Amino acid sequence: MMGKKARREYLDAIRSRYKKADKGIQQASLDECCRVCGYR
């Protein structure tokens, strides 16, 4: 499980990539985020 600071840094890093991506890439980014951050 990631700490709050590490999670915030990770989410900030992927936010711009997510905004620029098409729908398929956005879904993959969300899947990755859930896997990395431990969300279900």
Image (cartoon, rainbow, N blue to C red):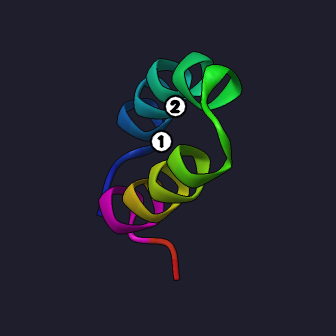
Q: Is residue 40 above or below residue 27?
A: below
Give the numbered dot on residue 8. Answer: 2
Q: Quadrant of residue 22?
A: top right
**What element does badge 1 sit on?**
helix
Residue for badge 1: 4
Residue at screen point 52% across, 31% down: 8
Query: Looking at the image, which is closer to me, 5 or 36?
Result: 36
Q: Which residues are magenta?
A: 34-38
**What element does badge 2 sit on?**
helix
Q: Position of residue 37 (x, y in %)?
A: 40, 58
Q: Quadrant of residue 27?
A: bottom right
Q: Quadrant of residue 19?
A: top right
Query: Looking at the image, which is closer to me, 21 or 14?
Result: 21
Query: Looking at the image, which is closer to me, 32 or 2?
Result: 32
Q: Is residue 5 above or below residue 25?
A: above
In the image, residue 40 lies in the stretch drawn in magenta: no
User: Crowding near pointer 2: few (<14 within 10 Å), some, many (20+)?
Assistant: few
Label pair 1/2, CB-CB below 8 angstroms:
yes
User: Crowding near pointer 1: few (<14 within 10 Å), some, many (20+)?
Assistant: few
Q: State the CA–CA distance, disc 1 to disc 2.
A: 6 Å
Query: Looking at the image, which is closer to me, 7 or 19?
Result: 19
Residue at screen point 52% across, 83% down: 40
- Farthest residue to the bottom: give it: 40
* Helix, strand or loop for the magenta stretch, by majority: helix
